[in-house]
Image (spheres, coloured by chain):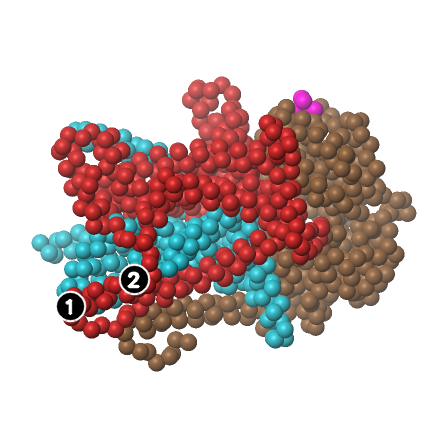
Amino acid sequence: MNERGRRFYILAGIFTLFVLFLYGPMFAIFALSFQGPEGGLTFPMRGFSTHWFAELWKGVGVVDIWAAFYRSLRLGAVVAGLTLAISLPAALAYRLGFRGATLLFYTVIASLIVPSIVVSLGIGLEFRLFDDWVKEFVTGHQTSTGLFTSALGAHLTWTLPFGLLILLAAFNRFDRRYEEAARDLGASPWQTLWLVILPIIAPSLIGIALFGFTLSWDELARTSQAIGGRNTLPLELRGLTQTVTTPAVYALGTMVTGVSLAVIGVSLLAITVMGRARARRSR
Amino acid sequence: MTDRPSRPGGLNRRKFLYGTAAATTVAASTKLFAPAVQAQEAPTLRYLGTAVNQSAEIAAKVKEDLGITIEYIPVTTDEVTRRVVTQPNTFDLVDIEYMSLKNVVPTGNLKGMDTSKITQADNITTLFTEGTIDGQPVGDQGTAPKKVIWLPGEEATDFATEPTGFMSLIPTVYNADTLGIRPDLIGRPIESWAELLNPEFKGKASILNIPSIGIMDAALVVEALGEHQYADKGNMTRDEIDLTIETLIEAKRAGQFRALWQDFNESVNLMASGEVVIQSMWSPAVTAVRTQGIECKYQPLKEGYRAWAAGFGLPATIDGRQQDAAYEFINWFLSGWAGAFLNRQGYYSAVLGTAKENMEAYEWAYWMEGAAAEQDIMSPSGQLLAKAGEVRDGGSYQDRLGAISCWNAVMDENVYMVRKWNEFVAS
Amino acid sequence: MTTTEQATGTPPIAEGRAHTALVTPQSDAAALHGVKRRVSLLDRPYALAGPLILVMAIFFVGPLILTIIVSFWEYTQYSIEPAMVVTNYVDVFDRCIARLPTLCVTFATYLSTLKFCFIVWAITLILGFTLAWFIVFEVKKTSTQIALFLLCTIPFWTSNVIRMMAWIPLLGRNGLVNQTLMSMGLISEPQEWLLYSDFAVILAFIHLYTMFMMVPIVNSMMRIDREILEAARDAGASIWTIAMSVVAPLCRPGIVIGSIFVITIVMGDYITVGVMGGQQIASVGKTIQVQMQYLQFPIAAANAVVLLGAVLMIIFAMTKLVDVRREL
């Protein structure tokens, strides 16, 4: 027990250091977002105010940052959903086995490997050819590239390998006896999936959705050539770096982090409270 | 798609799931195209360019004056060229550098602009149309605008040498670049490009990592060091490229550069944080450092400036109302308000006369005539740029632009140059 | 080390004989129970994998084929022209053999990229494994586990473009780290190697990609029966023995997948190396990106094909050591 306690504290220490390291750049971002109007992007701090949060609220001047923010948010949600909706059945297919499974596996791996910017260019070229073809039939057709066509596809080539690989690993150690038991008890395949398999791999599914959203939200290179007209948030921010960039972008970072922490804190609190209430009731 | 009568069994649930996903996707993308449809009433222009010239103030003013909605698509400099070449359907108006024209015009993706539709066409500065200021010729090494501004017609894939009725781009903004320095950390006068490689600044210098521009700064240094005299810095021979890159590699191996910078913002941060004390820089970057209360000088050098210019172009596919709206916007842009707005940031506008009408006399005197500021000079967003009594770095319009040594360029040996530049980065 | 899980748990995906697998499950079940059941969608692998195949075909294989075709084209500054030439590949390996043992640009770049790749892989593996252990075995409550996970994810919701800017104020001459160390009296003048160096690049990689290693390992670890650990401890095994010869082998799928993630991403990265190396360190991705900037698509495509080949070789070598497909 004693050795166990010591190990816990050592590992907890390492974990804390890692989290501190993860948040390292964030600390600089937090501090610098509270500068006065004359503030820049580097230390030393110049003044102290919430001026840049007000600027952020107004949209950072040059571009409509909030429009891009919501575009990325929508895209991220759709990507997360589709990643789940596509990789889960695919992983189930791998449990059955099929001709070409290995080929598909290596294609998915390759999709991860090929430099993002090349995939992006390829998709851009492909859509251009497609547009030219459509124009033969549809007058006034401009472009089919866009947030929920080419950009969505580009993001999926990035998130699907993660989804599939994580699920393959999850199913690898999946004890088939649970399913067999369910089947013996007369469950239909859908009931088995819904009531037995999904609950067991639920943590992986949540992880994939989270991964899918985070990867899409932060994706830059793969989107660059495949986005069409309107930019995602990272592209918009990247564009902003071509001109005077103010601590307003740091304010954006502070705000996103603050809101996320608050939302998660509140939901955890709710879960704990609800759990306690339930425990009390059942007692 | 989703209202198909559902069949019993597992199949339909999945169908439904995918059906919803597809329907959402379609709905989302039609929403995306919606603005183009609404354009029938109030035109919207998708304005592709770098964030440098894109400002909320200009968009708001256009909306007020013309009713046209400007939708900015801010991207990096190279990205502008790439999108014009690979995705010409994704914008209605592009703000692009003249040097890129050698790559863009041959693709036929840009439409020649009919100067008869441009009200101020005859008043565009002679720097662009003839390469002169007050009748005096200006340095024209590299891709000087006068070499690429004229097109033989509306659908052109090469350039005209004589003025025609068609321009490749209607100029918007231009400037002359030099080295930025931190006078407080250097403490002595800097007069030559050669100082960039002076071992005194070892580990505190920087050059920009945009090959076509970086190599020209390097060429200015090589000339200043007296190692070689180029026939045309904007169009080097292979031997000249080798020599220039060799000089850079030597300096890099000796630890001269703290970092290379890639975008505007990095250059500001390097300078403001004191990581670097001397580097290639763009004028608004110097301004940005100064507004943080840090001393920074846009140092005029005896070898002259490297100039650049940008302008508006139209995609080849544009026509009808969109095209009319684009011309209307460009005419508005040249009519003075926007010009004054640019001049107040330290850039230069294409039609000086109209800009002057929109500026206060003291502002014009400070920015354009090299006079000491009569009162505090403010940026358009209200930040203090110069206190009363200060003089603009480099002096008047004539002094600065008259001293242009070369223009940003795309060389004939561009492919080779990029390969050698990659060697420099990898060395 | 033989466990009940291993004995029964590994599905025979690797021997993916489509026809048999297609028929077996439900015919077995039907025979066993004497019940007639319709063929469910869940028994049809091609229908299940269909969407994935479709997305991959449209958005990856199509573009990839275009890329490969283009890598044999000729190009000028403003156009790419259909051709069937290998000059782009020759250019990629320009003077590489003739100048040996001096490394040509391509070889030197790959060497540098591989170096980063190996160091980052080793560190993220050890770190990821340790952190995963903590989350899975030392933290008992699921809600706490999820909270810790989210805590690690939140920084990634601030765009990397912004976070990259923040490394200067953190590690620069006047940055937080240098100022803290100086005020503590540990150093007397700012340390310059903290930023724009190999160290900075590796640090940023670890920062960005440890999660990619940790998540799959956590996934695998979650599945380990704790009784096995108890049994091993009861048998007198030290914690190191348990970690190395019980947990690590059982986590192999997670480790392999995490390794694939980290290696592939680091090999193709250009933004991190660019920013943290002060644009002074070459990477293959960077070379491709510069060539694309200048619209030299064919040579960029050729470089990409070479890179793809190189990474596939690494993955292939890994599969020689560990049978990935069987592990999955």
Residue at x 15%, y 30% (from the top left corner): C236
The N terminus of chain C lies in quadrant: top left
**Residue at the spot 69% in from the left edge and 67% down from the top edge:** B318
Task: Between residue B198 and residue C250, name the one nearer to us.
Answer: C250
Residue A225 horizontal side relative to residue C220, left or right: right
**Residue at 46% in and 50% down:** A110
Residue A129, by quadrant, is: bottom right
Cα separation, mark 2 vs mark 1, equals 20 Å
Residue C321: x percent and y percent?
A: 37, 39
x 51%, y 24%: residue: C191
Q: Is residue B161 above or below residue B234?
A: below
Placement of C105 over or under C7, stated as above or below: above
Of the numbered discs 2 and 1, the one sitting upstream in the chain is 2
- Give the colour chain C carries in the figure: red
Q: Which numbered disc, 2 or 1, marks the residue closer to the eye?
A: 2
Count of labels shown? 2
Q: Dot 1, crowdedness within 10 Å: few (<14), some or many (≥20)?
A: few
Proximity of marks 2 and 1: CB atoms separated by less than 8 Å? no
Give whichever of B241, B49 is nearer the camera: B241
As drawn, the chain in brown is: B
Give yes or no for residue B199 being in the magenta stretch. Answer: yes
Magenta stretch bounds:
B198-202
Badge 2 crowding class, 10 Å Cα cut-off, few under 14, some 14 to 19, many 20 or more, is few
Which label number is shown at residue C20? 2
Q: Secondary structure at mark 2?
A: helix
Q: Secondary structure at mark 1?
A: helix
Instruction: State yes or no: residue B383 in magenta.
Output: no
